[in-house]
Amino acid sequence: MMKTALVIMAAGLGSRYGGIKQLEPVGPSGEIIMDYSIYDAIEAGFNKVVFIIRKDLEQDFKEVIGNRIEKQIEVEYVIQDIEDLPEGYSKPEDRTKPWGTGQAVLSCYGVLKEPFAVINADDYYGKEAFVTIHNYLINGKQEPGIYDICMAGFILGNTLSDNGAVTRGVCKVDEQGMLIDITETAGIVRNGETAAAKDTNGNTIELDINSAVSMNLWGFTPDFLQELKKGFTEFLDGIQGNELKAEYLLPEVVGKLVKEGKAKVHVLRTADIWFGVTYKEDKEKVIKSFQELVNKGLYPAKLF
C-alpha cells in the first residue's frame, strides 16, 4: 500500500476563540474535531498523521489526543517555532505570533517523504473531501518541473460562520477544474443570498455565495517542501516594515506558483458542509452537528 500522510496544523494561538480551541470536546463521547478528521482520513486510506504543534502545547496535546491516536495510526510531531528561521535571520523583538501556515507546513521538512494532505485542526471537512484528496495523491501524474497539487474546493456558502467574519481563500477555477488564482480574503460575512468582505483598502466587495474556496485542505508531493523552504527566505526578504504581522500563507505560496507556471492545482469540488469553532459561540452548533451525524449513522457514538 502506498504511504500517505495527513498533516494537521494545530499550532494556532486560538486568539479569536479565547483558548486552545483545537482541544475543546465537541463529540458525544468527548471527541475533539481532530478526532473526526483523523477517523475520516484513516477510512480514506491515509496511514500516517503528522501533528504541527507549539512546544508549550505538547504535553496537553499528547494527553488529550496524541496518546490515543498513536494506537490507531503512525504519528509524528513537529514544532512550529517563531524563532525557527533560515540562517542569517532573527525574530523581530516584538513579534509574538507564528509566521503562518506556510511556515507551519515547512516545519515538516525532513519528516515527510510521502505524498501528504494538509488540514486545519479546528475545521470539520466531511468525508468526501478526504476520499477525493487521497485518491488524487495516489493516482496523480506529475509533470517534470511542475508541482502537482490538489485542493478541496468548498462552496463558500457552506463555510460561513453565523457568529462573525471568516477568512477564506477565494478561488478562480477554469472549466477543467484547474485553479487560475486564489485570493486570501478576510472579513467574509453572509449577506442574504450573497457574501460580503472588505478589500485591502477597506471597501466592501460582494462575493458569489457559490464561489469555490480553500479551507486549507491541500494535497502535495513531498518535493513541495523544498519550494516552501526557498519561498520562506524570499518572503522574509520582502516584508520590510511589516515584520510584526506579515504571514507566510500557504494559499499565497500556491497562488504565486500557479501564476509563475510552476504548479498546476486541481480543484476537487466537494458539497460537504464545513463547520468549526472559529468563535466561542460556534461551539454549541458544532456539538449539535456532530450529534446529528452520529444519529444518521455516519459516525459511531465513540470514535476511538
Image: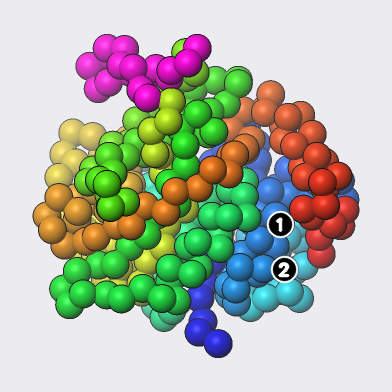
Residue 148, located in which quarter of the rendered image?
bottom left
Identify which residue, 17 or 150, lies in the foreground.
150
Residue 96, above or below 285: below
Amino acid at circle 1 = Asp
Question: Residue 63's quadrant in the figure?
Answer: bottom right
Is disc 2 in contact with disc 1, using a CB cutoff of under 8 Å?
yes
Magenta stretch encompasses residue 205: yes
**Residue 219, placed above or below residue 11:** below
**Secondary structure beneath disc 2?**
helix
| 120 to the left or right of 284 | left
| Residue 11 in sight in this render | no
Residue pointed to by mark 1:
35
The residue nearer to you, when weighing 290 against 62, is 290
Q: Residue at x 54, y 43 (%)?
A: 271
Residue name at image x 67 percent, y 76 percent: 73
- Which of the 4 image quadrants contains residue 17? top right
